Image (cartoon, rainbow, N blue to C red):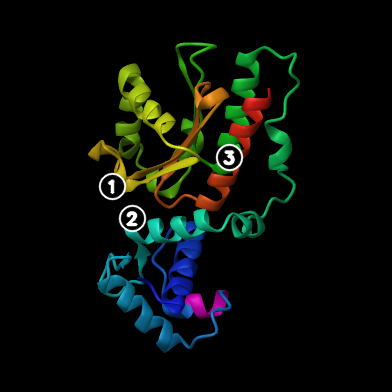
Amino acid sequence: MLSTRQHKVLQALVDEYIVSAAPVGSNTLVERYALGYSSATVRNELMELEEAGYALSPHTSAGRIPTDAGYRAVVNSLLLNPASLRMTIELGSVGYQQWSLFPNEEPPETRHWETLLSLSGFTGCLALLWAPSVSKTVFHKGIPTLLEQPEFRNARLILPLLQLLESHTDVLSLLATVTQHPGVVIRIGGENKDSQLSAFSLVASSFGRDKTGGVIAVVGPTRLDYRRAILAVSTASRNLETN
């Protein structure tokens, strides 16, 4: 179990790494986050987090980055505190409550494409939508958006995801497992059944009556903004149920 101080430091580490995509040092966390601890204290806590498997140092002289376990600890905390999740996201002018509210008279496929386009743009991830009552196809949007992420500057690193999308059976199998769980389903890096997807995270939710209408999801690097993704996917799921 993480102490309150360790959790605050881990949360700051995750938040900073989401923005910078570069190893983070204790001085940066002290300067940019109101932790209330000295740099030496934060440095010691980062060492403890690394020993516990929540962070790692990619180079001897570098700062630290979160591990899958570190992301999972932060995500679990977010899921246990929905009010905090809503309060901490910066909605700005994007208007997440509006982007997936389309008129009911629009054809379902049109609404789905618009939802995917907005969801991908809002999260910076690949957006997926499976609606078996509308089409046997898994709709997806956002490969170019995903390629803009620093992790995938080498396009070959995204090959496993492209191969998944090419295999209709495999992508359906992935999304079908989401319908077996209530609420938002999150799989981080190595939690994915397919080891080739260990560089990616999935945030997904089923929708429709008895959650049988389909699945809406985003796929991004493990460094994705989980607050933003969880809130966006949850909103899209609710709106798809009402449209």
Q: Main secondary structure of the magenta part?
A: helix
In the displayed structure, 7 sits above or below 14; it is below
Q: Residue flagged by tag 1: what amino acid is it?
A: Gly
Say whether disc 3 or disc 2 marks the residue closer to the N-terminus.
2
Image quarter of residue 237:
top right
Q: CA distance from mark 1 to mark 2?
A: 7 Å
> How dense is the environment of label 1, judged by Cα within 10 Å: few (below 14), some, or many (20 and up)?
some
Name above or below for residue 22 compared with residue 113.
below
Q: Nearer the viewer, residue 220 or 27?
A: 220
- Identify which amino acid the numbered label 3 is placed on: Ser
What x and y, as percent, mark residue 236? 61, 34
Identity of the amino acid at label 2?
Asp
Viewer-proximal residue among 183 and 156: 183
Task: Give the extent of the magenta segment.
Answer: 28-32
Is 78 on the left or on the right of 176, as rendered? right
Instruction: Read off the residue under disc 1.
Output: 190
* Residue at figure coordinates x 73%, y 42% from the top left: 95
Q: Give the SS element for disc 2.
A: helix
Image quadrant occupied by the C terminus: top right
Q: Position of residue 159 (x, y in %)?
A: 31, 32
Residue at mark 3? 234
Q: State the image coordinates of residue 240 (x, y, percent, origin top left).
A: 62, 26
Residue 107 visible, this angle: yes
Is 41 situated above or below 230?
A: below
Residue that protrudes farthest toward the front in the picture: 210
